[in-house]
Amino acid sequence: MMNSSHVNGRSRSLGRCRRPFAIFAFGAADLRYRAHSSASPLACLLLLALAASCAGRAGGQTPSQPLSPTPPAAAGPAARTVEVTKVVTSLPTGTPRPTSTPTRTATPLPTPFALVGATPVEGRRGPGEGFESLGLASAGQQLLVLGRTADASWLLVCCVRNQPAWVQPAALTVTNSLSGAPAVTAPPLPSPTPTLSTTVQPTVTVTPEPEPTALPPFDIAQGPEFPWPVTSGMLTIMVKVYQGPASNECALGGYTLDVIRDGVDVSKPILSRGRMCQFDTTGPAAGNYEFNLKYEYANAGQAQWAIYLARPDGTRVSRITMFNTIGSNSQQLAMVISYFLAR
């Protein structure tokens, strides 16, 4: 007979193994295992391993491999996928691709100016001697060059007698290049007036005798004289305009003296006086010359002069008198002249 304490100890050990492994299910075979009453703890472990192996075979499955751990995602901004669509536009066959050429902006040239020299320059309506004359540009006058002919033999300037005119550059001093003035197309020459030709019977032509040139109403009774020297540089002309015999001379009013300096009209609207037939005088120190019209021009300088008596409308009534001045200290700067109404 076994010792009761030994039997009780085995029972307690088997009880510890039986409780967790009392029943094992093996798939469809419904394998059941009941622990033997005499199994030891070591036997329980062997039975557990056997049961697990049998369960795998009974199910027809291969034990799954352990999963590898997934590496953690790298830190940083999330990756983005960008879809790029490339559009290709094909050019027509044979069509050259356009090319861009850089445009250069030309630097404008300075406007040319022309200075008239000592000789006045004649302005015309067109670049040629066949065009109408517009008058003279005076010495020292500055002209703006508006244009030119292609060969620059004529210049279009502003202004001669308050209007654009064509002049020749020979007597001009040009400032800045003439390339700054555009080439201007010349206006056409004025067409001559057509003459109608008719057939007529020949006739005897009588050539009339030429009529004598009419003499102006006034004669020069005295002068021109230059009785005293002048150092101020001012030209002074004492004019006596009268009618009647020497014993009964009477001053005539209403006439003017036209004065031309180097081809430029420098006249002044001064009329002769005729009140009560009396004259003014230069005084004894200057020779007691009588006059009723006085003309003055400051800074006369070196120039050529032409003078004549005229009516207020510009009609000349005497011969033309020419003289020269040669500087600021000259005896040619004080003149005396007398006009007598002869006809």
Image (spheres, grey):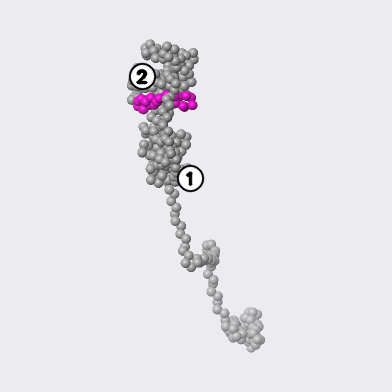
Q: Which residues are magenta?
A: 300-324
In which quarter of the view is residue 174 placed?
Answer: top left
Instruction: Find residue 215 and report its horizontal and vertical position in percent.
Output: 42, 25
Work out whether residue 243 can be spotted.
yes
The kind of secondary structure element at disc 1 is: loop
Disc 1 versus disc 2: distance between alpha carbons? 59 Å
Q: Residue at x 50, y 66 (%)?
A: 92
- Counting residues from the start of the chain, the first of labels 1 and 2 encountered is 1
Q: Is residue 38 left or right of residue 272?
A: right
Q: Is residue 143 visible?
A: no
Up the image or down, 193 lies above or below 313; here it is below
What residue does disc 2 label? 225
Residue at image point 42% right, 11% down: 247
Q: Amino acid at mark 1?
A: Thr
In the figure, 303 relative to 172: above or below? above
Q: Using the image, determine if residue 25 lies above or below residue 313.
A: below
- Residue indicated by mark 1: 198
